[in-house]
Image (spheres, rainbow, N blue to C red):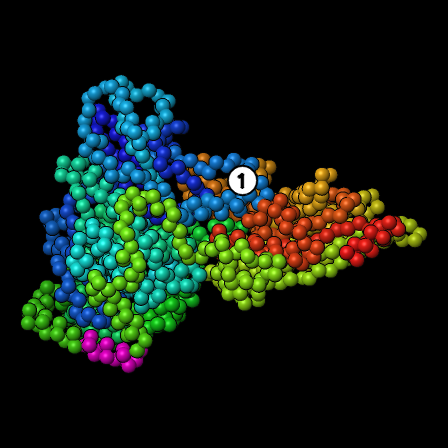
């Protein structure tokens, strides 16, 4: 979280910050979608931290800014060691020996001495964070039926459009830093808003200068480093199964564009910057393995959005550099060097990819990024920058290269490259050991689960991706599921179909076991010798025992002539490999050539001519426009839906969502209109519809909703009378909304059990009970019995973390009888005395927003917090995330309901299956009822539902309209659509009078 710069003039040297400048421009707050931050608020001086009271949310007094401490290392000089090759690169095979492009070796750690390896001086760091202003909606407003969905939609729009920007980032730093002993109160400048008075008066010798504050997300960034052909793609696909991480196949932006930056000229000139952005975007769009968005559509980058993001990033970085220079007594920097512009473009593209996939964090698998460590550290800071260092025996790396139709081909050249990359990583291990996690390929082969678990732990707390943030239950994959799901995951599938080099990604454990020390079985001794000569020092340091070069005495000097000979042979072999690839897989080579051609474009060749030749914008324009940047990926064009007739849903469904219309139709079910009559003249006309949802990661996921619509339940006969008087019969309706891995099975089982057990229980006559009490008791017993069957596994379903809601409506001749667990809902729609539509909820949602429900959960040892509150261990953290139920022992089960059928684990924390039952007299005038899952009610308020159903004479039309509108709003606000189920019924009283018959006759005639 970035920054408030606040100083006292009496002590201008004490400037503290935690600078994560790049996160300012990122367009997401994934798990806090309804935060509407007042980011241009003012804040007063941030007090320096003390050892006894480390700053943070818990140490700040109410009303004060909240400082926190993180050191940010800042390089005194730009450190860039040049370009290294990544063997599975999309363009590596076209450039031969790229080792010649490496302009400088890393600092030789093995040569010894602190003189070669020095840590950079770090500036002290702290920051003052102004309080966050949340959306001005109180809890009662939030909990109004249907309101939560509309607020989350509004908040997601706000957060998706990015954060507000501080327009005074580049203020006069010299003025801020100057020491002024004048004790007179300073008048605020014209464009400054005076701050509110502090609770405690500062001393008269201290006056304050206030700077506007920018607050943004503080997400970490990850780089996998080491050398290619070390199992990096295998590990990448496993980590990609993590719910909140995107780790796409790398196009190697920094490696391939850094040597070519000179041709773009001065990047402070926007015309030049636009050309570079255009070329980099095209380079990524033509990546060998296509970058896809959440909905499996090729990523296309909006150049103007990237430009504005880069401009703001650079402005923030320049601001930070000026501050650092002034702190260290150097002349303040006036411009940023070209490599940082390229890095800002790379970062904006990674952020856009992350956003386009609904993720929270990203990992770059361009293994040679280790050579840019000082630059990355300066850009991201210690708070954000993280490395995963993957090591593999260089002999196996060499063998893998030699058997793959890309990259280097000569063992000595390969080994020298491997050694250089290990030196880069060793420098990071020495300079910033806390930022790097080392993992050995051979250890991953031996125990994938535990090794991946260690990496996941290093990466930090996991969360669901943004598309599932509204789920009924938080489902975090186990390490076993992360590992086992990789070979069938999207990333592995995308790569495997394109090139032979990725053929191993979808193979099983038996193949993996054969990769250990493969060099000992298949590699020639002369090749082993060359590898060990080239990489002896690094092998020793990393614990790989040489086979032929046992000691220093066995080492042979490789002369310059031999190096040239090996390089020439490598070039020949690369050429032969490319020729063989043209025959074996011409499409693969064609894709590589298309991407490589981007690098050779001149400044006069453009992919997006309109963007390159567009008007110049300044930083003020960028700051003004950054709020309006909205990703076009997955968002509905609202104007297009105004003409839609949702009464005919799913006609034109493909125009309002992410799924082809034929698939939507195939996943839509309608129970058409029918009428049932009860004794006493009551008639019920009803219809039901259910639309299976859209889940980007599982497009064919089964509908987890189920329903009962119009099941007649016969009344029992009493044996206490001579004529065996029959009790009143009725009609049963119910909606079940399943959740969890086995939610479909739980909902179907509940549907069957509730129907059968209620019909049986209704026959159990107890003369001492009146009809309403008997029905309520029967429904309650039915729910509890059904839940018990699921919890104990008697029906063969694992309901430990799966279950279902259940909302029932039984209509007798005099009453509506309801029973409910969970957040499905039943509404009554009628006309009030003034003739207006009145909507009444016949059930109450069981969510962790209800105080009575919270008390029961807490009494059973459960914790009620939002996900981010649980992660921060701060229940007072401002949030509009959904409250959930957690265990004190760990972040599970994460249910967004307090009652359900099934969910055995949640039952230990106070979730119960006892329904709330109620009975309502049937209105004397005609009325309507609506039962639905939260797929309907999350985005359509109760009053609007009432207005919709009143428009239609045919309940089936009302069902289609409700399903279509709900689907539309889900797709408009989220990257997915929930299962949507609704039952609509008309209840009419019979008019048997002559006048009534006449009225009906003329009504039909009209």
Identify the main secondary structure in magenta.
Answer: helix
Of residues 269 and 330, the one nearer the viewer is: 269
Name the residue located 18 percent from the left edge and 29 percent from the top edge: 178
Say if 891 sits above or below 489 in the image.
above
957 sits left or right of 119 in the view: right
Say if 282 sits above or below 129 in the image.
below
517 sits left or right of 751 in the view: left
Quadrant (top left/top right/bottom left/bottom right) for the C terminus: bottom right
> Is residue 574 highlighted in magenta?
yes
Of residues 39 and 198, the one nearer the viewer is: 39
Say if 754 sits above or below 16 in the image.
below
Question: Which residue of the protein is positioned furthest toward the bottom in this rendering?
Answer: 583
Name the residue located 24 percent from the left edge and 64 percent from the top edge: 605
Q: Can residue 452 be seen from the camera position used here?
A: no
Q: Percent from the top left, x then y, of residue 449?
A: 39, 59
Q: Percent from the top left, x then y, of residue 513?
A: 34, 69
Q: Residues within 10 Å of mark 1 (few under 14, many from 20)?
A: some
Label 1 belongs to which residue? Answer: 142
Name the residue located 31 percent from the left edge and 66 percent from the top edge: 286
Of residues 514 and 201, the one nearer the viewer is: 201
Q: Can residue 498 be seen from the camera position used here?
A: yes
Q: Percent from the top left, x then y, of residue 864?
A: 51, 41
Question: Which residue of the protein is positioned furthest toward the right in this rendering?
Answer: 722
**What segment is highlighted magenta in the picture?**
573-585
């Amino acid at each position: 979280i970035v920054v408030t710069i606040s100083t006292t003039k009496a002590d201008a040297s004490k400037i503290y910050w935690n600078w994560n400048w790049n996160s300012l421009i990122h367009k997401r707050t994934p798990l806090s979608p309804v935060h509407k931050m007042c980011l241009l608020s003012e804040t007063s001086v941030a007090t320096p931290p003390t050892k006894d009271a480390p700053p943070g949310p818990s140490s700040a007094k109410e009303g004060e800014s909240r400082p926190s401490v993180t050191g940010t290392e800042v390089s005194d000089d730009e450190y860039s060691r040049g370009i290294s090759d990544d063997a599975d690169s999309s363009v590596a095979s076209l450039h031969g020996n790229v080792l010649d492009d490496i302009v400088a070796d890393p600092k030789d750690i093995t040569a010894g001495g602190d003189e070669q390896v020095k840590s950079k001086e770090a500036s002290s760091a702290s920051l003052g964070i102004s309080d966050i202003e949340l959306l001005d909606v109180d809890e009662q407003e939030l909990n109004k039926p249907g309101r939560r969905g509309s607020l989350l939609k509004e908040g997601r729009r706000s957060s998706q459009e990015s954060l507000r920007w501080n327009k005074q980032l580049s203020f006069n730093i010299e003025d801020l830093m100057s020491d002024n002993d004048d004790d007179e109160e300073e008048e605020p400048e014209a464009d400054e808003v005076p701050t509110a008075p502090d609770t405690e008066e500062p001393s008269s010798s201290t006056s304050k200068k206030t700077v506007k504050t920018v607050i943004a997300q503080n997400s970490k960034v990850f780089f996998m480093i080491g050398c290619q052909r070390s199992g990096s793609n295998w590990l990448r696909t496993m980590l990609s199964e993590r719910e909140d991480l995107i780790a796409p196949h790398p196009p190697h932006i920094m490696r391939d564009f850094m040597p070519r930056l000179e041709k773009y000229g001065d990047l402070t000139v926007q015309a030049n910057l636009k050309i570079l952005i255009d070329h980099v975007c095209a380079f990524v769009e033509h990546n060998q393995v296509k970058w896809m968005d959440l909905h499996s559509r090729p990523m296309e980058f909006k150049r103007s959005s990237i430009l504005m993001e880069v401009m703001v990033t650079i402005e923030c970085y320049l601001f930070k550099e000026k501050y650092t220079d002034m702190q260290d007594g150097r002349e303040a920097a006036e411009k940023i060097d070209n490599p940082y512009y390229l890095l800002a473009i790379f970062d904006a593209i990674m952020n856009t990819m992350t956003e386009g996939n609904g993720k929270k964090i990203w990992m770059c698998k361009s293994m040679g990024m280790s050579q840019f460590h000082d630059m990355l550290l300066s850009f991201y800071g210690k708070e954000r920058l993280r490395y995963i260092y993957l090591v593999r025996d260089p002999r196996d790396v060499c063998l893998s290269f030699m058997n793959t139709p890309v990259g280097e081909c000569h063992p000595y050249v390969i080994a020298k490259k491997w050694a250089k990359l290990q030196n880069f990583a060793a420098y990071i291990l020495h300079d910033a050991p806390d930022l790097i996690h080392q993992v050995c390929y051979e250890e991953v082969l031996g125990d994938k689960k535990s090794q991946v678990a260690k990496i996941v732990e290093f990466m930090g707390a996991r969360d669901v991706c943004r598309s599932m943030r509204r789920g009924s239950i938080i489902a975090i994959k186990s390490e076993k599921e992360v590992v086992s799901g990789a070979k069938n995951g999207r990333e592995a599938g995308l790569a495997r179909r394109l090139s032979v080099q990725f053929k191993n990604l979808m193979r099983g454990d038996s193949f993996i076991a054969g990769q250990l020390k493969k060099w000992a079985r298949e590699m020639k001794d002369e090749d082993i010798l060359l590898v060990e000569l080239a990489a002896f020092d690094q092998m020793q340091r990393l614990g790989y025992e040489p086979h032929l070069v046992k000691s220093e005495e066995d080492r042979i000097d490789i002369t310059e002539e031999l190096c040239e000979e090996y390089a020439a042979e490598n070039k020949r072999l690369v050429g032969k490999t490319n020729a063989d690839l043209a025959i074996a897989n011409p499409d693969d080579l064609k894709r590589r050539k298309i991407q490589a051609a981007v690098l050779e474009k001149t400044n006069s060749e453009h992919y997006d001519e309109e963007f390159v030749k567009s008007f110049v914008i300044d930083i003020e324009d960028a700051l003004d426009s950054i709020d309006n940047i909205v990703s076009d990926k997955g968002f509905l064009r609202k104007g297009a839906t105004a003409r839609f007739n949702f009464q005919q849903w799913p006609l034109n469904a493909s125009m309002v969502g992410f799924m082809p219309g034929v698939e939507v139709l195939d996943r839509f079910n309608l129970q058409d209109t029918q009428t049932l009559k009860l004794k006493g003249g009551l008639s019920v006309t009803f219809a039901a519809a259910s639309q299976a949802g859209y889940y980007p990661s599982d497009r064919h996921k089964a509908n987890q909703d189920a329903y009962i619509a119009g099941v007649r339940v016969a009344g029992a006969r009493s044996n206490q009378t001579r004529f065996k008087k029959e009790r009143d019969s009725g009609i049963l309706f119910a909606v079940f909304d399943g959740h969890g891995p086995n939610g479909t099975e739980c909902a179907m089982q509940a549907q069957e059990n509730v129907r059968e057990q209620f019909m049986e229980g209704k026959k159990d006559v107890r003369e001492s009970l009146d009809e309403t009490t008997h029905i309520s008791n029967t429904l309650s017993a039915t729910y509890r019995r059904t839940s018990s069957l699921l919890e104990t596994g008697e029906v063969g379903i694992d309901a430990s973390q799966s279950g279902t809601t259940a909302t029932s409506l039984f209509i007798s001749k005099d009453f509506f009888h309801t029973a409910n667990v969970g957040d499905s809902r039943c509404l009554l729609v009628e006309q009030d005395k003034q003739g207006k539509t009145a909507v009444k909820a016949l059930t109450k949602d069981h969510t962790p927003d209800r105080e009575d429900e919270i008390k029961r959960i807490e009494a059973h040892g459960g914790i009620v917090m939002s996900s981010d509150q649980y992660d921060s261990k701060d229940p007072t953290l401002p949030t509009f995330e959904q409250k959930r139920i957690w265990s004190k022992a760990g972040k599970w089960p994460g249910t967004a309901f307090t009652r359900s059928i099934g969910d055995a684990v949640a039952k230990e924390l106070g979730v119960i299956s006892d329904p709330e039952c109620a009975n309502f007299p049937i209105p004397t005038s005609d009325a309507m009822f609506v039962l639905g899952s939260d797929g309907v009610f999350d985005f359509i308020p109760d009053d609007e539902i009432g207005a919709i159903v009143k428009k239609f004479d045919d309940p089936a039309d009302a069902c289609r309209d409700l399903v279509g509108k709900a689907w539309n709003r889900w797709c408009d606000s989220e990257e997915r659509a929930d299962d949507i189920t609704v039952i609509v019924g008309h209840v009419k009283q019979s008019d048997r009078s002559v006048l009534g018959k006449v009225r009906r006759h003329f009504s039909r005639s009209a």
